[in-house]
Image (tube, grey):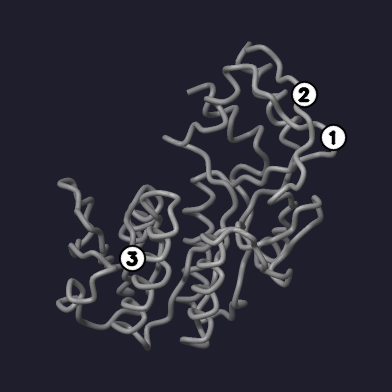
Amino acid sequence: MAHILIFGCGAIGQQLAVELIHLGHHVTGVKRTPPKVQHGITYFAADISQAASLEGLNGHYDLLLFIVSSSDRSEASYHDIYETGLTNVLTKHPTTPCFFISSTSVYGENSGAWVNEDSPTAPTERTSQLIVSAEQRVTAAHPDNVIIRFSGIYGSGRHYLLKIAQFSPEVQRTPPYYTNRIHQQDCVHSLLFLINKRLSNQPLASCYLASDNAPAPMWEVMSWLTKQMNCPAPTEAPAKNPVTANKRCDNQRLKDLGYTFIYPSYQEGYREQLND
């Protein structure tokens, strides 16, 4: 049995914790306001941006997961999490190996080219720059730390594209503007897969890109969704200039390690959502 510490028990963190408990592990979840229904998770109430609130979080942990998301898209919120909050966590648990959940927003690619774990991380947005800086500090803090970069997450309770598809959206068609997706279930199970590898003392790379097998032009995705939903087809929008983020995410490193995606493309994932 491993003792696992999860910072940020939102939808993904909580589901991951429940899966780990079913496997016999002990999970402590750190959350600003713990839920009333705790599913066997030992919760610790804390605000990671306040170092004093972590003072009582003691004990030995075999692995730490940082799955904290910002409350909004402001630079101040990102600074609280990825600068102040992360520093407080690493200071409190300097020797505990960490899985840091990052984002594919760290890439600066804007021409639709493929990116992987070794591609440059030079985003133009300040919020994404804060994530890059956080990644660098995590990597430097411990040789066994691992970065996992998720692309656009969809699934239960995440209906952003479905809402857009209802209203005949304007979408860039030429040149293609790519969207990269990962279903929430694949977020949980890819993390569970990597945790099992770590706890079995199997070597891991320092970074994994977790996105499904099929980056697709947004025009294709919206055309498919509107057809499935019997909504008016998208209309063609003029090309944006400049484009701030346009890339295709290569997940080969994760697949080479042995992970098989539950939802290999947006069609499998969204078809299930629409049927539900």
In the image, residue 220 sits, relative to residue 265, either above or below, namely above
Relative horizontal placement of residue 47, taking residue 165 as reference (left or right):
left
Marks 1 and 3, how far apart in space?
Answer: 42 Å
The kind of secondary structure element at disc 1 is loop
**Percent x, y of residue 57:** 20, 76
The kind of secondary structure element at disc 3 is strand
Mark 3 near mark 2, Cβ–Cβ under 8 Å?
A: no
Marks 2 and 1, how far apart in space?
Answer: 9 Å
Residue, disc 3: 6
Query: Residue 236 got which mark?
Result: 2
Identify the residue shown where x is 71% and y is 35%.
218
In the image, residue 183 sits, relative to residue 14, either above or below, namely above
Q: Tag 2 or tag 3, which sits nearer the N-term?
A: 3
Identify the residue shown where x is 59% and y is 45%.
262
Point out the frontmost of discs 1 and 3. 1
Point out the frontmost of discs 3 and 2. 2
Residue, disc 1: 174
Mark 2 near mark 1, Cβ–Cβ under 8 Å?
A: yes
Q: Amino acid at mark 3?
A: Ile
Q: Tag 3 or tag 1, which sits nearer the N-term?
A: 3
Q: Amino acid at mark 1?
A: Thr
**Percent x, y of residue 12:** 41, 51
Q: Examine the image and state in which quarter residue 81 appears.
A: bottom left
Q: Tag 1 or tag 2, which sits nearer the N-term?
A: 1
Mark 1 near mark 3, Cβ–Cβ under 8 Å?
A: no
Q: Amino acid at mark 2?
A: Glu
Relative horizontal placement of residue 107, taking residue 98 as reference (left or right):
right
Is residue 1 or residue 126 the one in the foreground? 126
**Percent x, y of residue 107:** 67, 62
Q: Residues within 10 Å of mark 3 (few under 14, many from 20)?
A: many
Relative horizontal placement of residue 28, taking residue 12 as reference (left or right):
left
Is residue 17 or residue 53 the one in the foreground? 53
